[in-house]
Image (tube, rainbow, N blue to C red):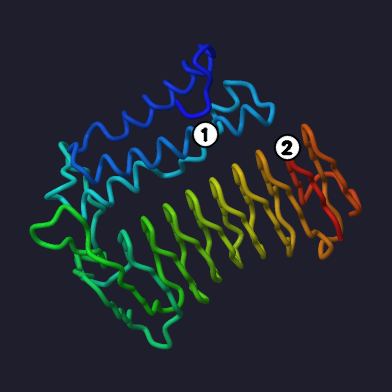
């Protein structure tokens, strides 16, 4: 299997455990070509990440846990694709849908596409404005606006690339965006909760949110996030992460095989940054002081900021890269 040696029984056992974990996530779904392609892509990606983790000095358990954690919201991604394309990606058990506002006022936007790019912009009005190209369809289910990519009739393959542009009013409720191979771009979005999940696309832009979850399996993430004393989680499995963070309460940032660059503004409780085979660079020069905990297995650690215990806690760890926290 990949670069795992045939006589390495322990590595085989661990990789088999990861394979069983991924297969268990696919059990509720029909074994069609689309499902097989997605599962194969994820398995190969996990195999490479596991071998890279072992090569960087991690134990089998550490490598296993790191790979599983890097998968992010896999359940959500699969459920979304299944909901959008039930004929060829059938769920054996339908999941309960979120409750909708009986007044019809839209409080949630759900976007789920495969090959289309998605762009979210700030609207100058109180209305949601949607512009699409390609085979994109939309409908409202109570208080939820659902936008998805339509499958070509009579074909096992999904429609060609299109685009989705959504103008979002200020102080919006909840936004969920998932893509398979499309990029996600956000421009000055103001919302309570935002979840962005790209399988092999890049994610970039600017958010003003209370809580945010951002995940890319094999793409880069470049974001400016203005938090409202909320929680931010950002993860890229095999891409670089570049963040400007303002006013967040807690921040969890990780990348398996990419570099992480974080610029911190305003005070916070804790910022946790983890990388396996990449460098970590933190600009904390705008803070009065920080409490730093940093570690690198095979790299160098450098800190040039004032140390103050009890607040602005930065925890930075990498296996085979350098850690730098500077003014």
Residue 316, quarter of the rendered image:
top right
Q: Is residue 231 visible?
A: no
- Give percent across and percent down for residue 254: 61, 46
Q: Considering only vertical position in the picture, is 19 above or below 293?
A: above
State how far apart marks 1 and 2 are (Cα): 16 Å
* Residue furthest out toward the left: 154
- Give percent across and percent down for residue 293: 80, 40
Viewport quadrant of the C terminus: bottom right
- Give percent across and percent down for residue 196: 44, 58
Number of residues whose C-alpha sits closer than 10 Å to that of mark 1, classed few (under 14), some (14–19) or many (20 or more): many
Residue that mark 1 sits on: 67
Mark sitting on residue 264: none
Residue that mark 2 sits on: 320
Q: Considering only vertical position in the picture, is 168 above or below 257?
A: below
* Residue furthest out toward the bottom: 124
Q: Considering only vertical position in the picture, is 126 above or below 253?
A: below
Q: Residue drawn at (67%, 51%), measured in percent from left and top?
A: 259
- Give percent across and percent down for residue 117: 38, 68
Q: Nearer the viewer, mark 1 or mark 2?
A: 2
Q: Are marks 1 and 2 in contact (CB under 8 Å)?
A: no
Q: Secondary structure at mark 1?
A: helix
Is residue 182 shown left or right of residue 314?
Answer: left
Is residue 251 shown left or right of residue 95?
Answer: right
Q: Which badge, 1 or 2, comes first in the chain's sequence?
A: 1
Q: Residue drawn at (61%, 59%), measured in percent from left and top?
A: 229
């Amino acid at each position: 299997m990949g670069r795992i040696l045939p006589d390495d029984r322990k590595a085989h056992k661990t990789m088999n455990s990861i394979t069983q974990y991924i297969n268990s996530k696919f059990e509720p779904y029909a074994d069609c070509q689309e499902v097989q392609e997605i599962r194969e892509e994820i398995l190969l990606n996990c195999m490479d990440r596991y071998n890279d983790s072992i090569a960087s000095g991690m134990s089998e358990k550490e490598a296993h846990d790191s790979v599983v954690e890097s998968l992010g919201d896999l359940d959500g991604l699969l459920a979304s694709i299944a909901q959008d394309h039930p004929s060829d990606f059938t769920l054996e058990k339908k999941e309960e849908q979120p409750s909708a506002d009986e007044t019809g006022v839209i409080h949630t936007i759900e976007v789920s596409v495969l090959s289309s790019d998605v762009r979210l912009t700030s609207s100058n009005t109180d209305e949601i404005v949607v512009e699409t190209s390609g085979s994109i369809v939309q409908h409202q289910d109570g208080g939820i606006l659902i936008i998805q990519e339509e499958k070509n009739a009579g074909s096992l393959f999904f429609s060609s690339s299109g685009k989705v542009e959504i103008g979002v009013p200020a102080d919006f409720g909840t936004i969920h965006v998932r893509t398979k191979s499309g990029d996600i771009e956000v421009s000055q979005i103001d919302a309570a909760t935002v979840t962005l999940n790209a399988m092999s696309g890049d994610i970039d832009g600017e958010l003003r949110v209370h809580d945010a979850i951002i995940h890319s399996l094999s793409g880069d993430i470049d974001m400016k996030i203005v938090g409202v004393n909320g929680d931010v989680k950002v993860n890229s499995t095999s891409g670089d992460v570049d963040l400007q963070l303002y006013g967040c309460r807690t921040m969890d940032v990780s990348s398996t095989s990419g570099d992480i660059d974080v610029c911190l503004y305003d005070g916070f409780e804790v910022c946790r940054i983890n990388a396996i085979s990449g460098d970590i660079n933190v600009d904390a020069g705008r803070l009065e002081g920080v409490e730093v905990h940093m570690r690198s297995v095979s790299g160098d650690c450098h800190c040039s900021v004032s140390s103050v215990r009890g607040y602005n806690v930065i925890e930075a760890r990498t296996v085979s890269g350098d850690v730098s926290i500077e003014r």
